[in-house]
Amino acid sequence: MNNKLNLLFGELYTEVCSHITEDGGLPSVDLTKLLDITKEIKANLRPISFADNTWDSNSEIAIIWSIEDIQESNNNLTNEQAFDVLTTLDRYHDYSYGISWDTVADTITNMYPDVEHDEDKEDDDK
């Protein structure tokens, strides 16, 4: 993790801890400040690069899904919505079955039922 992220996480931790009461509550925490710090953390996160992978490419693999993959399933999703779908898939998918195009489509439908889906151009040509 880079130094800027370390500093931001430290700032977030300090901000929260400085407001914790003896009973564990957070009565006076500044949510706007926490949101600003969180947004800055998100802006400074970088994707994993294959150049600095942490797995042994001789005995392990990594399957990577991207925002573009999610938008291929529904091209009306914004980048932020597509990333939300990715993080939801990562957090809640069934490890016995993995992630498939069906689970991507179902997750999009469940998370964003009001976002219209443009049919593939192939379907329009029929």
Image (cartoon, rainbow, N blue to C red):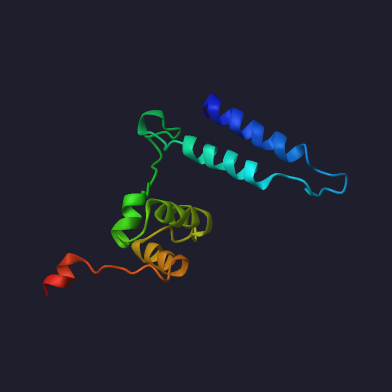
Residue 117 in the image: above or below residue 90: below
Residue 74 in the image: above or below residue 41: below
Q: Residue furthest top?
A: 3
Q: Position of residue 84 (x, y in %)?
A: 46, 54
Q: Quadrant of the C terminus?
A: bottom left
Q: Nearer the viewer, residue 39 or 94?
A: 39
Residue drawn at 59 percent across, 29 percent down: 6
Q: Quadrant of residue 118?
A: bottom left
Q: Is residue 98 left or right of residue 24?
A: left
Residue drawn at 37 percent across, 34 percent down: 57
Residue 18 in the image: above or below residue 72: above
Residue drawn at 32 percent across, 53 percent down: 69
Q: Quadrant of residue 55?
A: top left
Q: Is residue 23 left or right of residue 30?
A: right
Q: Position of residue 9 (x, y in %)?
A: 62, 34
Q: Position of residue 83 (x, y in %)?
A: 43, 51
Q: Residue furthest bottom?
A: 126
Q: Is residue 91 left or right of residue 82?
A: right
Residue drawn at 53 percent across, 54 percent down: 91
Q: Nearer the viewer, residue 86 or 9?
A: 9
Q: How many marks?
A: 0
Q: Nearer the viewer, residue 100 or 57?
A: 100
Q: Quadrant of residue 76?
A: bottom left
Q: Residue furthest left?
A: 125
